[in-house]
Image (cartoon, rainbow, N blue to C red):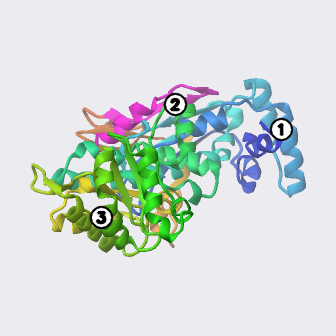
Amino acid sequence: MNRFRDIARLLVLNTDSYKTSHWLQYPPGTQTVFSYIEARGGSLPYTVFFGLQALLKEYFSDPVTAEDVALAGEVCAAHGVPFNHDGWQHIVQAHGGRLPLRIRAVPEGTVVPVNQVLVTVENTDPACWWLTSYVETVLLRVWYPTTVATHSHATRRLIGEALARTGDPAGLPFKLHDFGARGVSSLESALLGGMAHLVNFQGTDTMTALLGARAYYGEPMAGFSIPAAEHSTITAWGRDGEADAYRNMLRQFGKPGALLAVVSDSYDLDAAVTRLWGGELREAVIASGAVVVIRPDSGDPTTVVRRTVQSLDAAFGSDVNAQGFKVLRHVRVIQGDGITRSSIASILAALEEAGYSADNVAFGQGGALLQQVNRDSLGFAMKASAVQVNGAWRDVFKAPVTDPAKRSKAGRLTLVQRDSQYATVRLDDPAAQGAGATEVLRTVWENGRLLVDDPFATIRARAALD
Protein backbone atom coordinates (compact mmCIF):
# COMPACT_ATOMS: atom_id res chain seq x y z
CA MET A 1 0.00 0.00 0.00
CA ASN A 2 1.47 3.40 -0.93
CA ARG A 3 2.07 6.08 1.65
CA PHE A 4 -0.50 8.50 0.23
CA ARG A 5 -3.27 5.94 0.61
CA ASP A 6 -2.04 5.17 4.13
CA ILE A 7 -2.44 8.82 5.07
CA ALA A 8 -5.71 9.34 3.19
CA ARG A 9 -7.43 6.51 5.08
CA LEU A 10 -5.98 7.43 8.51
CA LEU A 11 -8.79 6.83 11.01
CA VAL A 12 -7.69 9.55 13.40
CA LEU A 13 -8.25 12.14 10.65
CA ASN A 14 -11.21 10.45 8.95
CA THR A 15 -13.53 13.15 10.28
CA ASP A 16 -14.68 16.73 9.71
CA SER A 17 -12.44 19.55 10.86
CA TYR A 18 -14.95 20.91 13.35
CA LYS A 19 -15.11 17.54 15.11
CA THR A 20 -11.56 18.00 16.39
CA SER A 21 -12.72 20.75 18.78
CA HIS A 22 -15.81 19.01 20.13
CA TRP A 23 -14.01 17.27 22.99
CA LEU A 24 -13.73 20.73 24.58
CA GLN A 25 -17.44 21.49 24.20
CA TYR A 26 -19.26 18.78 26.18
CA PRO A 27 -20.43 19.44 29.76
CA PRO A 28 -17.89 18.74 32.52
CA GLY A 29 -18.33 15.22 33.83
CA THR A 30 -19.52 13.76 30.52
CA GLN A 31 -18.83 10.02 30.47
CA THR A 32 -20.86 8.54 27.59
CA VAL A 33 -22.36 9.85 24.39
CA PHE A 34 -25.03 7.72 22.70
CA SER A 35 -25.87 8.41 19.04
CA TYR A 36 -28.00 6.80 16.34
CA ILE A 37 -28.25 6.72 12.55
CA GLU A 38 -31.57 6.84 10.72
CA ALA A 39 -33.00 7.57 7.29
CA ARG A 40 -35.60 10.28 7.79
CA GLY A 41 -37.23 9.63 4.42
CA GLY A 42 -37.09 10.88 0.87
CA SER A 43 -37.28 9.14 -2.48
CA LEU A 44 -38.57 5.86 -1.00
CA PRO A 45 -40.46 4.93 2.18
CA TYR A 46 -38.00 2.23 3.26
CA THR A 47 -34.31 1.32 3.30
CA VAL A 48 -32.32 -1.82 2.54
CA PHE A 49 -29.53 -1.50 5.09
CA PHE A 50 -26.12 -2.40 3.66
CA GLY A 51 -22.42 -1.60 3.78
CA LEU A 52 -21.53 -1.13 7.45
CA GLN A 53 -19.52 -4.36 7.60
CA ALA A 54 -17.34 -3.21 4.71
CA LEU A 55 -16.74 0.20 6.30
CA LEU A 56 -15.82 -1.33 9.66
CA LYS A 57 -13.41 -3.79 8.10
CA GLU A 58 -11.77 -1.18 5.94
CA TYR A 59 -11.46 1.75 8.35
CA PHE A 60 -11.82 0.45 11.91
CA SER A 61 -9.77 -2.75 11.80
CA ASP A 62 -6.26 -1.29 11.91
CA PRO A 63 -5.30 0.05 15.35
CA VAL A 64 -4.40 3.70 15.77
CA THR A 65 -0.68 4.16 16.45
CA ALA A 66 1.38 6.80 18.21
CA GLU A 67 2.71 7.79 14.80
CA ASP A 68 -0.85 8.34 13.58
CA VAL A 69 -1.57 10.57 16.58
CA ALA A 70 1.59 12.59 16.01
CA LEU A 71 0.79 13.12 12.35
CA ALA A 72 -2.81 14.11 13.14
CA GLY A 73 -1.56 16.66 15.68
CA GLU A 74 0.77 18.13 13.10
CA VAL A 75 -1.96 18.35 10.46
CA CYS A 76 -4.49 19.92 12.82
CA ALA A 77 -2.02 22.51 14.09
CA ALA A 78 -1.20 23.60 10.55
CA HIS A 79 -4.92 23.48 9.65
CA GLY A 80 -5.86 25.84 12.48
CA VAL A 81 -7.97 23.52 14.65
CA PRO A 82 -7.34 21.95 18.07
CA PHE A 83 -6.54 18.26 18.42
CA ASN A 84 -7.22 15.93 21.35
CA HIS A 85 -3.72 14.50 21.55
CA ASP A 86 -4.13 13.16 25.09
CA GLY A 87 -7.45 11.49 24.24
CA TRP A 88 -6.06 9.68 21.22
CA GLN A 89 -2.88 8.78 23.05
CA HIS A 90 -5.07 7.24 25.77
CA ILE A 91 -6.69 5.03 23.11
CA VAL A 92 -3.24 3.96 21.93
CA GLN A 93 -1.94 3.19 25.41
CA ALA A 94 -5.04 1.86 27.18
CA HIS A 95 -6.67 0.05 24.25
CA GLY A 96 -3.81 -0.82 21.95
CA GLY A 97 -5.16 1.66 19.43
CA ARG A 98 -8.52 -0.15 19.19
CA LEU A 99 -11.59 2.06 19.40
CA PRO A 100 -13.56 1.66 22.66
CA LEU A 101 -16.94 1.78 20.97
CA ARG A 102 -20.06 -0.33 20.90
CA ILE A 103 -21.86 -0.28 17.56
CA ARG A 104 -25.22 -1.97 17.17
CA ALA A 105 -26.96 -2.26 13.83
CA VAL A 106 -29.80 -3.75 11.84
CA PRO A 107 -28.71 -6.97 10.06
CA GLU A 108 -27.51 -6.01 6.60
CA GLY A 109 -30.05 -6.69 3.87
CA THR A 110 -33.00 -6.01 6.19
CA VAL A 111 -35.79 -3.92 4.70
CA VAL A 112 -36.78 -1.28 7.28
CA PRO A 113 -39.24 1.64 6.98
CA VAL A 114 -37.74 5.12 7.15
CA ASN A 115 -37.70 7.07 10.42
CA GLN A 116 -36.40 4.05 12.33
CA VAL A 117 -33.06 3.58 14.06
CA LEU A 118 -30.62 1.62 11.89
CA VAL A 119 -27.39 1.97 13.91
CA THR A 120 -26.49 3.06 17.44
CA VAL A 121 -23.04 4.07 18.65
CA GLU A 122 -21.70 4.67 22.15
CA ASN A 123 -18.29 4.85 23.80
CA THR A 124 -17.41 2.12 26.31
CA ASP A 125 -14.56 3.99 28.03
CA PRO A 126 -15.73 7.06 30.02
CA ALA A 127 -12.46 8.79 29.12
CA CYS A 128 -13.51 8.68 25.46
CA TRP A 129 -16.91 10.39 25.61
CA TRP A 130 -15.85 12.51 22.63
CA LEU A 131 -15.19 9.52 20.35
CA THR A 132 -18.83 8.71 19.51
CA SER A 133 -19.34 11.95 17.63
CA TYR A 134 -15.82 11.95 16.19
CA VAL A 135 -16.52 8.83 14.09
CA GLU A 136 -19.81 10.18 12.68
CA THR A 137 -18.17 11.21 9.42
CA VAL A 138 -16.91 7.75 8.52
CA LEU A 139 -19.93 5.82 9.86
CA LEU A 140 -22.56 7.98 8.25
CA ARG A 141 -21.12 7.14 4.84
CA VAL A 142 -23.19 3.97 5.16
CA TRP A 143 -25.87 6.19 3.58
CA TYR A 144 -24.32 5.56 0.16
CA PRO A 145 -24.39 1.75 -0.13
CA THR A 146 -27.72 1.69 1.70
CA THR A 147 -29.26 4.20 -0.70
CA VAL A 148 -28.00 2.34 -3.77
CA ALA A 149 -29.21 -0.98 -2.35
CA THR A 150 -32.60 0.56 -1.62
CA HIS A 151 -33.08 2.05 -5.08
CA SER A 152 -31.90 -1.17 -6.70
CA HIS A 153 -34.35 -3.11 -4.53
CA ALA A 154 -37.23 -0.86 -5.60
CA THR A 155 -36.33 -1.55 -9.23
CA ARG A 156 -36.23 -5.28 -8.47
CA ARG A 157 -39.77 -5.04 -7.09
CA LEU A 158 -40.93 -3.21 -10.21
CA ILE A 159 -39.44 -5.71 -12.66
CA GLY A 160 -40.46 -8.65 -10.50
CA GLU A 161 -44.10 -7.57 -10.59
CA ALA A 162 -43.96 -7.35 -14.40
CA LEU A 163 -42.38 -10.79 -14.66
CA ALA A 164 -45.01 -12.26 -12.36
CA ARG A 165 -47.73 -10.94 -14.66
CA THR A 166 -46.15 -11.67 -18.04
CA GLY A 167 -43.15 -13.99 -17.79
CA ASP A 168 -40.77 -16.10 -15.73
CA PRO A 169 -39.67 -14.64 -12.36
CA ALA A 170 -36.64 -16.96 -12.43
CA GLY A 171 -34.93 -14.48 -14.74
CA LEU A 172 -35.22 -11.57 -12.30
CA PRO A 173 -31.63 -11.65 -10.94
CA PHE A 174 -30.29 -10.65 -14.35
CA LYS A 175 -32.83 -8.04 -15.39
CA LEU A 176 -30.92 -4.95 -14.15
CA HIS A 177 -27.24 -4.82 -15.09
CA ASP A 178 -24.80 -2.40 -13.44
CA PHE A 179 -23.11 -0.18 -16.06
CA GLY A 180 -22.01 2.41 -13.50
CA ALA A 181 -18.27 1.90 -12.88
CA ARG A 182 -17.14 4.71 -15.19
CA GLY A 183 -19.82 7.11 -14.02
CA VAL A 184 -19.00 7.31 -10.32
CA SER A 185 -16.73 9.67 -8.44
CA SER A 186 -14.16 7.12 -7.29
CA LEU A 187 -13.04 3.52 -7.22
CA GLU A 188 -14.45 3.21 -3.69
CA SER A 189 -17.85 4.41 -4.91
CA ALA A 190 -17.80 1.76 -7.62
CA LEU A 191 -16.91 -0.87 -5.03
CA LEU A 192 -19.51 0.11 -2.43
CA GLY A 193 -22.30 1.04 -4.82
CA GLY A 194 -21.62 -1.92 -7.08
CA MET A 195 -21.80 -4.31 -4.12
CA ALA A 196 -25.01 -2.67 -2.96
CA HIS A 197 -26.63 -3.33 -6.34
CA LEU A 198 -25.51 -6.96 -6.17
CA VAL A 199 -27.53 -7.41 -2.99
CA ASN A 200 -30.56 -7.46 -5.31
CA PHE A 201 -29.26 -8.57 -8.72
CA GLN A 202 -26.48 -10.70 -10.16
CA GLY A 203 -25.70 -8.82 -13.37
CA THR A 204 -22.81 -6.35 -13.34
CA ASP A 205 -19.97 -4.92 -15.36
CA THR A 206 -18.50 -3.22 -12.25
CA MET A 207 -15.69 -5.65 -11.56
CA THR A 208 -14.50 -3.72 -8.51
CA ALA A 209 -17.76 -4.71 -6.83
CA LEU A 210 -16.85 -8.37 -7.26
CA LEU A 211 -13.60 -7.79 -5.37
CA GLY A 212 -15.42 -5.90 -2.63
CA ALA A 213 -17.93 -8.71 -2.10
CA ARG A 214 -15.04 -11.16 -1.95
CA ALA A 215 -12.95 -9.08 0.48
CA TYR A 216 -15.62 -7.82 2.86
CA TYR A 217 -18.37 -10.45 2.62
CA GLY A 218 -16.59 -13.66 1.65
CA GLU A 219 -18.45 -14.10 -1.65
CA PRO A 220 -16.24 -15.86 -4.25
CA MET A 221 -18.29 -14.53 -7.19
CA ALA A 222 -21.16 -12.13 -6.61
CA GLY A 223 -22.03 -11.20 -10.19
CA PHE A 224 -21.78 -12.20 -13.82
CA SER A 225 -21.55 -10.70 -17.28
CA ILE A 226 -21.38 -11.75 -20.94
CA PRO A 227 -19.31 -10.79 -24.01
CA ALA A 228 -20.65 -7.52 -25.37
CA ALA A 229 -19.80 -5.05 -28.13
CA GLU A 230 -19.24 -1.33 -27.82
CA HIS A 231 -19.59 1.21 -30.61
CA SER A 232 -15.87 1.28 -31.38
CA THR A 233 -15.69 -2.47 -31.98
CA ILE A 234 -18.55 -2.15 -34.47
CA THR A 235 -17.64 1.13 -36.19
CA ALA A 236 -13.98 0.05 -36.56
CA TRP A 237 -15.23 -2.18 -39.37
CA GLY A 238 -16.60 0.88 -41.21
CA ARG A 239 -20.19 1.57 -42.18
CA ASP A 240 -19.99 -0.82 -45.11
CA GLY A 241 -18.60 -3.48 -42.76
CA GLU A 242 -21.40 -3.32 -40.18
CA ALA A 243 -22.69 -6.77 -41.10
CA ASP A 244 -19.14 -8.13 -40.92
CA ALA A 245 -18.78 -6.70 -37.41
CA TYR A 246 -21.96 -8.46 -36.32
CA ARG A 247 -20.91 -11.65 -38.08
CA ASN A 248 -17.61 -11.53 -36.21
CA MET A 249 -19.49 -11.31 -32.90
CA LEU A 250 -21.36 -14.47 -33.83
CA ARG A 251 -18.16 -16.20 -34.89
CA GLN A 252 -16.30 -15.28 -31.70
CA PHE A 253 -19.03 -15.80 -29.11
CA GLY A 254 -22.03 -17.48 -30.77
CA LYS A 255 -22.02 -20.92 -29.19
CA PRO A 256 -25.00 -23.10 -28.25
CA GLY A 257 -26.46 -21.86 -25.00
CA ALA A 258 -24.32 -18.71 -24.98
CA LEU A 259 -25.42 -15.11 -24.58
CA LEU A 260 -23.82 -12.15 -26.36
CA ALA A 261 -24.86 -8.51 -26.50
CA VAL A 262 -24.39 -6.31 -29.57
CA VAL A 263 -24.96 -2.56 -29.66
CA SER A 264 -26.79 -1.96 -32.92
CA ASP A 265 -27.52 1.76 -33.27
CA SER A 266 -24.13 2.89 -34.58
CA TYR A 267 -25.75 4.01 -37.83
CA ASP A 268 -29.40 3.05 -38.26
CA LEU A 269 -30.93 0.87 -35.58
CA ASP A 270 -34.06 -0.02 -37.52
CA ALA A 271 -32.05 -1.04 -40.58
CA ALA A 272 -29.66 -3.06 -38.43
CA VAL A 273 -32.55 -4.93 -36.80
CA THR A 274 -34.61 -5.59 -39.93
CA ARG A 275 -32.08 -5.74 -42.76
CA LEU A 276 -29.04 -7.21 -40.98
CA TRP A 277 -30.05 -9.15 -37.84
CA GLY A 278 -33.46 -10.07 -39.18
CA GLY A 279 -32.33 -10.53 -42.78
CA GLU A 280 -28.74 -11.16 -43.83
CA LEU A 281 -27.68 -12.65 -40.49
CA ARG A 282 -30.92 -14.34 -39.44
CA GLU A 283 -29.89 -17.90 -40.30
CA ALA A 284 -26.45 -17.43 -38.74
CA VAL A 285 -28.06 -16.30 -35.49
CA ILE A 286 -30.33 -19.33 -35.41
CA ALA A 287 -27.55 -21.73 -36.39
CA SER A 288 -25.24 -20.42 -33.66
CA GLY A 289 -27.50 -21.74 -30.91
CA ALA A 290 -26.81 -18.58 -28.93
CA VAL A 291 -29.20 -15.91 -27.72
CA VAL A 292 -28.22 -12.59 -29.29
CA VAL A 293 -29.13 -9.58 -27.16
CA ILE A 294 -29.67 -6.49 -29.27
CA ARG A 295 -28.82 -3.20 -27.58
CA PRO A 296 -30.57 -0.06 -28.80
CA ASP A 297 -28.57 2.82 -27.38
CA SER A 298 -30.32 5.99 -28.49
CA GLY A 299 -33.76 7.48 -28.97
CA ASP A 300 -36.75 7.45 -26.68
CA PRO A 301 -36.31 4.28 -24.60
CA THR A 302 -39.97 3.26 -24.52
CA THR A 303 -40.59 3.75 -28.23
CA VAL A 304 -37.29 2.25 -29.34
CA VAL A 305 -37.51 -0.88 -27.21
CA ARG A 306 -41.07 -1.65 -28.22
CA ARG A 307 -40.29 -1.11 -31.91
CA THR A 308 -37.14 -3.23 -31.69
CA VAL A 309 -38.97 -6.11 -30.00
CA GLN A 310 -41.72 -5.99 -32.60
CA SER A 311 -39.20 -5.98 -35.47
CA LEU A 312 -37.31 -8.91 -33.97
CA ASP A 313 -40.58 -10.76 -33.56
CA ALA A 314 -41.36 -10.25 -37.23
CA ALA A 315 -37.97 -11.67 -38.17
CA PHE A 316 -37.41 -14.47 -35.65
CA GLY A 317 -40.89 -15.27 -34.37
CA SER A 318 -42.06 -15.80 -30.82
CA ASP A 319 -43.86 -18.25 -28.56
CA VAL A 320 -46.82 -17.51 -26.32
CA ASN A 321 -46.13 -18.37 -22.68
CA ALA A 322 -48.52 -19.64 -20.01
CA GLN A 323 -49.58 -16.08 -19.12
CA GLY A 324 -50.51 -15.39 -22.72
CA PHE A 325 -47.58 -13.12 -23.63
CA LYS A 326 -45.10 -13.47 -26.48
CA VAL A 327 -41.47 -14.45 -25.88
CA LEU A 328 -38.97 -13.92 -28.70
CA ARG A 329 -37.05 -16.82 -30.22
CA HIS A 330 -33.24 -16.63 -30.46
CA VAL A 331 -32.99 -12.94 -29.53
CA ARG A 332 -33.57 -10.51 -26.67
CA VAL A 333 -33.16 -6.75 -26.07
CA ILE A 334 -31.18 -4.83 -23.46
CA GLN A 335 -31.75 -1.10 -23.04
CA GLY A 336 -28.87 0.78 -21.43
CA ASP A 337 -29.59 4.39 -22.33
CA GLY A 338 -31.91 6.68 -20.36
CA ILE A 339 -32.70 4.03 -17.77
CA THR A 340 -34.44 5.09 -14.56
CA ARG A 341 -37.19 3.40 -12.55
CA SER A 342 -39.64 5.60 -14.37
CA SER A 343 -38.38 4.66 -17.84
CA ILE A 344 -38.25 0.97 -16.87
CA ALA A 345 -41.89 1.15 -15.79
CA SER A 346 -42.80 2.84 -19.07
CA ILE A 347 -40.95 0.26 -21.18
CA LEU A 348 -42.47 -2.69 -19.34
CA ALA A 349 -45.96 -1.21 -19.61
CA ALA A 350 -45.54 -0.60 -23.34
CA LEU A 351 -44.36 -4.15 -23.94
CA GLU A 352 -47.18 -5.61 -21.85
CA GLU A 353 -49.74 -3.52 -23.70
CA ALA A 354 -48.33 -4.83 -27.00
CA GLY A 355 -48.61 -8.41 -25.78
CA TYR A 356 -44.93 -9.05 -25.01
CA SER A 357 -43.46 -10.64 -21.90
CA ALA A 358 -40.96 -8.84 -19.69
CA ASP A 359 -38.73 -11.87 -20.43
CA ASN A 360 -37.80 -10.14 -23.69
CA VAL A 361 -35.97 -7.22 -22.15
CA ALA A 362 -33.22 -6.46 -19.66
CA PHE A 363 -31.89 -3.09 -18.53
CA GLY A 364 -28.46 -1.58 -18.03
CA GLN A 365 -28.12 1.34 -15.63
CA GLY A 366 -25.05 3.47 -14.99
CA GLY A 367 -24.95 6.89 -13.35
CA ALA A 368 -28.59 6.76 -12.31
CA LEU A 369 -27.81 3.60 -10.34
CA LEU A 370 -24.52 4.46 -8.62
CA GLN A 371 -24.06 8.23 -8.89
CA GLN A 372 -27.37 10.06 -8.96
CA VAL A 373 -27.94 9.74 -5.22
CA ASN A 374 -26.88 11.78 -2.21
CA ARG A 375 -27.29 11.75 1.56
CA ASP A 376 -30.62 13.54 1.25
CA SER A 377 -32.07 10.95 -1.15
CA LEU A 378 -33.25 9.04 1.93
CA GLY A 379 -32.57 11.75 4.52
CA PHE A 380 -29.70 10.08 6.38
CA ALA A 381 -28.45 11.59 9.64
CA MET A 382 -26.49 10.61 12.73
CA LYS A 383 -27.51 12.39 15.93
CA ALA A 384 -26.66 12.20 19.62
CA SER A 385 -29.73 11.20 21.60
CA ALA A 386 -28.41 10.72 25.15
CA VAL A 387 -25.41 11.61 27.30
CA GLN A 388 -24.27 10.36 30.67
CA VAL A 389 -22.97 13.17 32.90
CA ASN A 390 -21.60 12.39 36.38
CA GLY A 391 -23.38 9.02 36.33
CA ALA A 392 -26.81 10.33 35.28
CA TRP A 393 -28.33 9.94 31.83
CA ARG A 394 -30.01 12.87 30.14
CA ASP A 395 -31.88 13.07 26.84
CA VAL A 396 -30.29 14.93 23.97
CA PHE A 397 -32.24 16.10 20.95
CA LYS A 398 -32.80 19.03 18.64
CA ALA A 399 -36.17 20.56 17.71
CA PRO A 400 -35.61 23.44 15.26
CA VAL A 401 -38.64 25.69 14.91
CA THR A 402 -37.55 26.54 11.37
CA ASP A 403 -37.69 22.89 10.22
CA PRO A 404 -39.76 20.53 12.41
CA ALA A 405 -38.86 17.62 10.11
CA LYS A 406 -35.35 17.79 11.50
CA ARG A 407 -36.44 17.11 15.07
CA SER A 408 -34.23 14.30 16.34
CA LYS A 409 -34.98 11.37 18.62
CA ALA A 410 -34.21 11.37 22.34
CA GLY A 411 -32.87 8.73 24.72
CA ARG A 412 -30.95 5.49 24.40
CA LEU A 413 -32.67 3.73 21.57
CA THR A 414 -33.11 0.38 19.89
CA LEU A 415 -35.27 -1.11 17.15
CA VAL A 416 -37.84 -3.83 17.77
CA GLN A 417 -40.13 -5.84 15.51
CA ARG A 418 -43.57 -7.01 16.49
CA ASP A 419 -46.11 -8.60 14.11
CA SER A 420 -43.95 -7.60 11.12
CA GLN A 421 -43.99 -3.97 12.25
CA TYR A 422 -40.88 -2.04 13.27
CA ALA A 423 -40.71 0.46 16.12
CA THR A 424 -37.90 2.54 17.58
CA VAL A 425 -38.13 2.39 21.39
CA ARG A 426 -36.14 3.48 24.41
CA LEU A 427 -33.83 0.96 26.03
CA ASP A 428 -34.82 2.25 29.48
CA ASP A 429 -38.55 1.68 28.87
CA PRO A 430 -39.18 -2.06 28.45
CA ALA A 431 -42.94 -1.46 28.48
CA ALA A 432 -42.63 0.49 25.23
CA GLN A 433 -41.41 -2.62 23.45
CA GLY A 434 -44.62 -4.50 24.15
CA ALA A 435 -45.29 -8.21 24.45
CA GLY A 436 -43.90 -10.38 21.71
CA ALA A 437 -41.45 -7.76 20.45
CA THR A 438 -38.08 -8.95 19.13
CA GLU A 439 -35.05 -6.69 19.28
CA VAL A 440 -33.64 -6.16 15.78
CA LEU A 441 -30.40 -4.34 16.51
CA ARG A 442 -27.39 -6.50 17.34
CA THR A 443 -23.90 -5.61 18.48
CA VAL A 444 -21.62 -5.76 15.45
CA TRP A 445 -18.56 -4.00 16.87
CA GLU A 446 -17.25 -3.70 20.41
CA ASN A 447 -13.91 -2.48 21.74
CA GLY A 448 -11.99 -2.98 18.54
CA ARG A 449 -13.52 -6.31 17.54
CA LEU A 450 -15.91 -7.11 14.71
CA LEU A 451 -18.53 -9.42 16.24
CA VAL A 452 -20.66 -10.09 13.15
CA ASP A 453 -19.24 -11.16 9.79
CA ASP A 454 -22.20 -11.91 7.54
CA PRO A 455 -21.68 -13.71 4.23
CA PHE A 456 -23.06 -11.99 1.14
CA ALA A 457 -25.52 -14.82 0.51
CA THR A 458 -27.15 -14.23 3.89
CA ILE A 459 -27.57 -10.53 3.15
CA ARG A 460 -29.07 -11.27 -0.25
CA ALA A 461 -31.53 -13.71 1.33
CA ARG A 462 -32.72 -11.07 3.81
CA ALA A 463 -33.30 -8.49 1.08
CA ALA A 464 -35.20 -11.04 -1.01
CA LEU A 465 -37.70 -11.63 1.80
CA ASP A 466 -39.46 -8.36 0.98
* Residue 459 % position (x, y): 41, 35
* Residue 344 % position (x, y): 33, 63
Which numbered mark, 3 or 1, is in the foreground of this view? 3
Q: Residue at 86% across / 44% down in the picture?
A: 73
Callout 3 secondary element: helix
Q: Which residue is mark 1?
A: 69
**Relative to 106, does residue 332 appear above or below in the rendering?**
below
The image quadrant that residue 53 belongs to is: top right
224 left or right, relative to 25: left
Which span of residues is magenta-colored? 438-466
Q: Residue at 44% across / 43% down in the picture?
A: 198
Q: Earlier in the sequence, mark 2 or mark 1?
A: 1
Q: Is residue 250 visible?
A: yes
Gap in angstroms between the C-alphas marked 2 and 1: 26 Å
Residue type, numbered disc 3: Gly
**Relative to 303, does residue 231 appear above or below in the rendering?**
above
Callout 2 secondary element: strand
Q: Which residue is mark 3?
A: 279
Could you tell me if the residues under marks 2 and 1 are in contact, i.e. CB atoms within 8 Å?
Answer: no
142 left or right, relative to 332: right
Residue type, numbered disc 1: Val
Residue type, numbered disc 2: Val
Who is closer to the viewer here, 423 or 149?
A: 149
Which numbered mark, 2 or 3, is in the foreground of this view? 3
Q: Residue at 36% across / 55% down in the picture?
A: 293
Q: Which residue is mark 2?
A: 444
